[in-house]
Image (cartoon, helix red, strand yellow):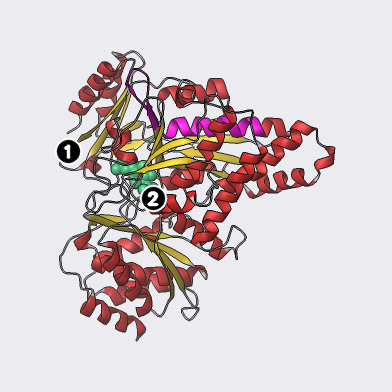
Amino acid sequence: ALLERAAATGLEKHPRKLNIQIKYGTAGFRTIANQLDHVIYRMGLLAVIASKSRKATIGVMITASHNPEEDNGVKLVDCHGEMMPAIWEKYATQLANAGDDEIVGVLRNILSAEVKNPDVSAKVIYGKDTRPSSVPLAQSLQDGIVALEGEYHDFGLLSTPQLHYLVVCTNTNGAYGQPTEEGYYNKLSHAFQALSKQQEPTPCKNYSRRLYVDAANGVGAPKLRSLLSHLGGLLDVQVFNDGSEGRLNYQCGADYVKVQQKLPVDMKVEAGIRCASFDGDADRIVYYYIDQDGKFNLLDGDKIATLVAGYLQELVARSGINLNLGLVQTAYANGSSTEYITDTLKVPVACVPTGVKHLHHKAQDFDIGVYFEANGHGTVLFSDDALKRIADSAGKNSSLTSDEKQAVKHLSTVIDVINQTVGDALSDMLLVEIILRTRDWSPSDWNKQYIDLPNRQLKVKVKDRNVISTTDAERKVVTPDGLQAAIDTIVTGYTKGRSFVRPSGTEDVVRVYAEADTQVNADKLAKEVGNKVY
Ligand code: 16G
Ligand code: ZN
C-alpha cells in the first residue's frame, strides 16, 4: 500500500505533465528546470530504495553544474561516494519516464531485483546548488523520500564534492572525517596548514599568496569564503563572479574559460597574477594567467594533473616506500601533457573514455592514482594498502633517514588535503597552492614545464549522434563505416596532428577535437574532420 500511496502523492503533487523522454546520463538527469519536478520526486523514491538495497546512506545532489541557470539536474551518489552503477541509471531512466499510473509497477520491479528486506530503514542526505529552481526541486525530492518513509537530512547549499564527502563520512562513521560541512572545512584546512608549516620554505621569490578566483556566480563563492575563514590567512584570495542572480556560469566559470580559452567577464587581471575558475557546482577548477605580453595562458586539468603527479612521485621516491603511482587521462588530454608525463615524469599513463566514473575506476588500479579530465575535474586516490603503508612508515620513524622522514610526513599530511571521493575545486585549489608554494613557482614557471599543442574543439549538429560509436577510449570511430579511415587520411596532412570525434553524453551534438603544431592548423584540422561528420 506504501507504493500505491507514493504513486498517488506523485500524481497529486508532482505529476508528469509533459510526455518527454529523459535519460540518466554520465552526469545524472540534466535539462530545463521546469521539466524536472516529477523526475526529482521520483529520484527521492529511488534514493530510498537504493538506501534499502545498500543498507547505507545514499546522497542526492540537485545541480546542473556548468549548464545555464535555467537548467537543473539531479544525481544520485552511491554509499561509497561514487556514481551509481549502470543498472541504477537504467532504473532511474525507467522511473522518470513512466506514466503516473505505471510508477507502482516500476518501483515493484526495482525493489524485487535489488532489495532483500524492504522493511529495513532508509536514509538519504541531499544538497543543492544556488539555482533558484533548486529550492522547489529540493522540496520535491524531500516529498519523494518521505513518501517511501525514508529518513532524510537536508544539508542545504552544498558543492557537489561536499555532498560526496558527506556521504562517505556518514557511511564510515566519521573515519573519513566529520559528516558535517564544518568537518569538511576542518579536515582540508588543518591538513593545508600543517603542510604549510612542514614545508616552511625559504621566503618565496616566485610564488605569491595572491590568487584571483572566478566562482562562476555559483555555490563555490560562499563555500570558498567559508574555507578561507579556516586558513589563517595562508592564501590571499579575491573572489570574482561571486553570486549575482541570473548570471550563473554566464561568460564565466571553468567550462567557459577552458573552451573559450579566455578570461571570464568582470575580472580585471594584472599580468602574472595567478587566477582560477570554478564551475557552477565547484567540482572543476582550471587555472590561468595573463603574461607580460598580455597573452592569456591556460593551466587546465592536464597541467594540474602533471603538477600533482610530479609532486607525489617525488615524495614517494624520497619516502622510500614502494608505491606505484599512475595517471589517468581521457582522449582530450593535450598530446604534450601525455608526452611529458611519459618521457619526463616517467609516470605510467592510462587513457579511458570521458566521464568521471571511468577515470575514478581506472585510478583504483594504482597504489596512488591521479586522475584528471582536461576540463579540470579530477582528484587523487590512495588505495587502502597505500594508506596503511604510509601510516606504518610514519609510525616507524626511527629507522628512517631525515629526508625519508620528512617525505613520509608530507605524504601522510597531503592525503587529508585531498577530497578522494570526487574531483573538488576547493580541495584541488589547496593542493595546487601547496605544490606551487613548495616549488616556489610562479604561474609561468608552472606553465613552462611543457608547452601545450594548439588545439580546437567543435560541436557538430547531426540528425542522430548515436550512429557514431567509438572504441579505444574514444580515440577511434567504429561506425559509421569509413569515417575513421577518412579522419586518418586528413590527419596525415598535419604536423603533430591528432583528431577524434565522439557523440556528447550531455548535449545533442557530436564533439570534434583536434590538435596540431599551430593554432591555424588545429582550427583547420578540426574543421576538415567536422565536415566528415553529418
Ligand atoms: C559530464 C561528466 C564529465 C564529462 C562531461 C563530458 C561526470 C560526473 N561528469 O559532465 O566528467 O567531462 O560530461 O560531456 O561524469 P560531454 O559528453 O558532453 O562531452
Ligand atoms: Zn560541475
Residues at marks 2 and 1, CA–CA distance in whole angstroms: 32 Å
Q: Which residue is mark 2?
A: 220
Camera-side mark, 2 or 1: 2
Q: Nearer the viewer, residue 276 or 383?
A: 276
| Side of 445 where 89 appears, left or right | left
Q: Which residue is mark 1?
A: 461
Q: Nearer the viewer, residue 452 or 249?
A: 249
Q: Are marks 2 and 1 in contact (CB under 8 Å)?
A: no
Q: Give residue 428's position: percent from left, percent from top.
A: 49, 42
Q: Nearer the viewer, residue 489 or 208?
A: 208
Tell whether position 111 is magenta.
no
Q: Is residue 243 above or below residue 302?
A: below
Stretch in magenta: 288-315
- Which residue is depicted at the point 31% across and 57% down? 130
Task: Give ligand 1's quarter of the image.
Answer: top left
* Amino acid type, residue under disc 1 in the picture: Lys
Based on the displayed image, in which of its 4 quarters is residue 273 positioned? top left
